[in-house]
Image (tube, rainbow, N blue to C red):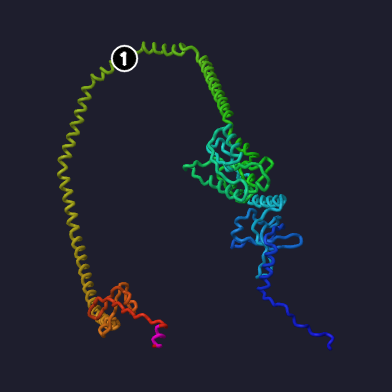
Amino acid sequence: MDLIDDAAPSNAHEFTVSEISGAIKRTLEDQFGRVRVRGEIGRVSRPSSGHLYFDLKDERACIAAVTWKGQAARLSTRPEEGIEVIATGRLTTFPGQSKYQLIVDEIEPAGAGALMMMLEKRRKALAAEGLFDESRKRPLPFLPRVIGVVTSPSGAVIRDILHRLRDRFPTRVLIWPVAVQGQDCAPQVTAAIRGFNALPETGAIPRPDLIIVARGGGSLEDLWGFNEESVVRAAAESAIPLISAVGHETDTTLIDFASDRRAPTPTAAAEMAVPVRAELAARLGECGTRMIRASQQARQRRQQRLADLGRALGRPQALTDPARQRFDLFAERLEPALRAFTRRCRDRLGALPLSLAALRAHLRNRREALQGQERRLPLGLARLARRKAERLADLAPRLERAGARMRARSTSDRDQLDRLDTRLTAAGARILPPRRDGLDRLDRLRQTLGYTETLKRGFAVVHGPSGLITAAAEAAQAPRFEIEFHDGRIPARPETPPARPPRKTREAKGQKSLF
């Protein structure tokens, strides 16, 4: 007997790879149908398919997790690498790679520490993009005509804002109702901010001059919707100045950094939005009083200045006495001056006949000069006409020579055209006969290849409503058709096929054979 015997054959059942994988999958899903797993997220992958792949790990182990595309859009917390979360889902296996994984349906932060760490990480990333820069912030309008409020219409916040606005300065308010916590908070607040900015300035609904995003106090989880990236980006992109009034004075959200002004409470936001009407009225009254007092003082100063200048002018008689004295002096000299002027005019009139005689002599001289020019004018015209006639006589031979040259040139052109016409006629006589013979050959070839020659040999063509009919089945189904012969077409209709006799059943055949 050998010291070592051969191993006896085993009677254990043999499993295929698929069978053992399926058994493991059923066992794991039955044992861990619905579980909640706490761990840190690592290696987040977001492929173009829309699914989310990430790892859940602690200091000793790691579990692969996946969230399908439809569920990923409904997650309240987006998975980010490095934060601690509680993932809810079911365990299953992936036979293709012999591993197990967690199908995650819901993700929630593991605690305030994880939320604060994720909040700080998101704040630094958005600040690096410049969304919190002071240069982006716009000043608030002094007296807005319309204020848009983004909050819940059923809470105490909107009542506090409206009450405070009514006490300070009644203003038109547009309320955009939104959810202020939960999964719907972030998308609704984002849509509200962008919706107010999208309103036309001259539309039926007035565009707000100021937006207030308000919510009462709450825990970090309750205010988390105002920390979402979409809300922060909408607040930073808003063309309308925006006041953030989320939570109490000790609460801080990311929208506070992106807004143009942060209010510690919703009531404080209403106080920032509008001034106090009574204070404005008092200020206007004070300004009116100061304006009246200033105008009175200016008028009094001008009156005093005018009085001072009047005292510097002296007595009015002192200004008129020199003028009166000059008038008296000139009045005494006026009468002798008038007499002297009259005498000069009389002397000038007495010398006037001599001047008239000189004028008559000048006119007579001018008349004689004109008459002499009138006598010389016919002679000058005759001499001018004679010179023009001589000039035309000199030009006549030159014109005749130019005409002869032009007639000779037209004769040479006509001869050249006659030569070209002769050459064209000869070329046409050489080219046309071969071309005509080639055209005749092509026409005979066309007739030989055409189907009309085939019809002359006893064939026919069947034309249907929609084209040629080439099969008997088509002819039987056509309502009408035409048959084309070599000498014309005739209409035809398909005949109805005779009804076939019913087939005999096997039982009938058997009975006939028996008898």
Residue 318 left/right relative to 224 = left
Camera-side residue of 6 and 406: 6
Examine the image and state in which quarter residue 165 appears.
top right
Q: Residue at x 61, y 58 (%)?
A: 71
Q: Residue at x 74, y 80 (%)?
A: 10
Camera-side residue of 17 and 245: 17
10 is higher (above) or lower (below) than 39: below
Camera-side residue of 133 and 278: 278
Residue 94, can we see it?
Answer: yes
Residue 417 left/right relative to 236 = left
Examine the image and state in which quarter residue 391 appears.
bottom left
Residue type at tag 1: Leu
x, y percent for residue 512 = 39, 86
Secondary element at tag 1? helix
Task: For the N terminus, give its image quadrant.
Answer: bottom right
294 is higher (above) or lower (below) than 165: above
Task: For the C terminus, give its image quadrant.
Answer: bottom left
454 is higher (above) or lower (below) than 319: below
Q: Residue at x 36, y 12 (%)?
A: 333
Examine the image and state in which quarter residue 294 appears.
top right
Majority SS type along the magenta span: helix
Q: Which residue is mark 1?
A: 338
Q: Is residue 450 magenta?
A: no
x, y percent for residue 140 = 58, 39
**Residue farthest along the front direction in this orientation:** 515
Residue 430, can we see it?
Answer: no
Residue 1 left/right relative to 420 = right
x, y percent for residue 134 = 63, 44
Q: Is residue 510 magenta?
A: yes
Range covered by the magenta-colored residues: 508-514
32 is higher (above) or lower (below) than 135: below
x, y percent for residue 100 = 69, 66
